[in-house]
Amino acid sequence: KGLVRYSSRMYKILTARELGAKGIIFISKRSKITKEREVRMNIKSGMFLAEVTQDAAGKLMGTDFSKIVTKLDNYNPHESNSFDTKLEITGNLKVTKVHSKDNNIVGVVYADNSDEYIVIGAHYDHLGYGEEGSLADDSVRHQIHNGADDNASGTTVVMELAEYYAQLKKDNPGAIKKNLVFAFWSGEELGLLGSSEFMEQAEKKGLKFESYLNYDMVGILKDNKLSMQGAGSAENWRKLIEKKNILAGFNIAVSDDPYLPTDATSFYKKNVPVIAFFTGLHEHYHRPSDDYENLNIKGMERIANFSTKIIDDLLSDKTEIKYKKVDMSSETNVRGFAVYLGTIHDYVAEVEGVKLSGVRGGGPADKAGVR
């Protein structure tokens, strides 16, 4: 697991770029390449990228490439595995922007007399056949990525919560003191597109949300460990979580950072307190092996039950959840390998350059006055 970071294509690309490479040719184990590489990777790296078969690589290098593969498979750390070759390659590149549409799915359990809204959400999109974002080896990269944990697990928990509160409304209407919005987001894997669009429309309509609960990858509970992320977005999240966990009995890790690589960020940047449920990364993440057999169904049920205790508290106003600005700290988990500016990109906007939808409090951009 410790070498996963170094095996990714993006890590190799950015390392080569730092060392002065102008481009990279990846040599695939597939006998035929029928699908283009990801446009997203080309744009992010700013380099010439190509992919060829081993037969094509052998012709380019004037050698039997199978011998090189054998040498690499029998890796000897004391032997040099690099070699010189003189190649002149000419190619044509084009980027084709593909427009498509998808839908968020939103339902509401209404309170009788309230203009307050609590949103409970999960993204229901995934990676299809590995066209974008797959971490799988080339040999299985374009197999179906079912995404059982990411994020059928979160979708299932939100569906269960929606069913529970819809029935509660029928049985005891007075228990629903605030409007409960149950949302299933599209386009999360492409950059939080669905939840960002929802918040833009909500802002135009003047809708205000009291809080947002997010469920992304809650299906593989191990060693009873549950992560609760974004607790710094409101003063009393930690108090509420710890109180309700007394009976739930999770080994809970609470983190303050609300700038998360999930739909919670779409809400927090609009000044809504957020909390995100998460059971952790694993070896099946963004791979075809993320299937139902790996899920901890009992763990998901426990997380759903734990959630009702928190939501019931929010409905009854027993704990005040009020937005709080979180400044970046040295403990902030920043993903990626590029220079960090502390900006939040708007992935939906079609403009020249990059449109920013916000900045992280206390980050370099914030300190420089970027708005």
Image (cartoon, rainbow, N blue to C red):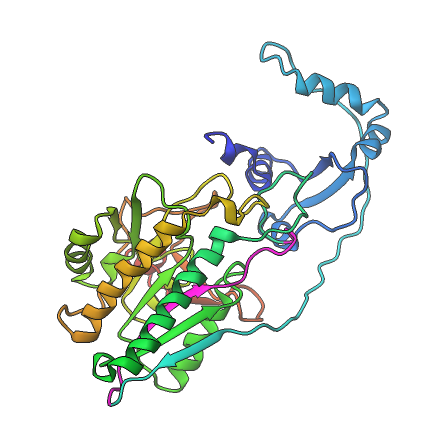
Q: Quadrant of residue 90?
A: top right
Q: Residue furthest top?
A: 78
Q: Nearer the viewer, residue 358 or 103?
A: 103
Residue 305 belongs to the span the image colors magenta: no
- Determine which quarter of the picture holds residue 362: bottom left
Most extreme residue toward the front is: 171
Between 34 and 183, the residue placed more toward the observer is 183
Residue 242: percent from left, percent from top? 17, 54
Q: Which residue in the rendered view is the most extreme toward the bottom?
A: 113
- Of residues 186 and 290, the one drawn nearer to the viewer in this rendering: 290
Residue 89 location in percent, x, y? Answer: 81, 39
- Is residue 28 placed above or below 292 in the rendered structure? above
Is residue 329 visible to us here? yes
Counting the numbered discs, the total is 0
Estimate the x, y position of residue 227 in percent, counting from the top left: 30, 49
In depth, the one of 323 and 147 nearer the eye is: 147
Q: Residue at x 29, y 76 (%)?
A: 168
Residue 178 visible (yes or no): no
Q: Judge from the rendering whether residue 215 lies leftward or rightward of residue 90; answer left or right.
A: left
Asked whether residue 116 is drawn in magenta, I would say yes
Write the residue at 51% across / 34% down: 4
Residue depicted at 48% across the width and 53% down the height: 150
318 to the left or right of 123? left
What secondary structure prevails in the magenta region? loop
In magenta, the rendered stretch is: 113-131
Where does the C terminus fall, quadrant-wise? bottom left
Location of residue 76 with respect to 118 vertically, above or below = above
How far across and down, in percent of the image, does residue 46 sit?
62, 49
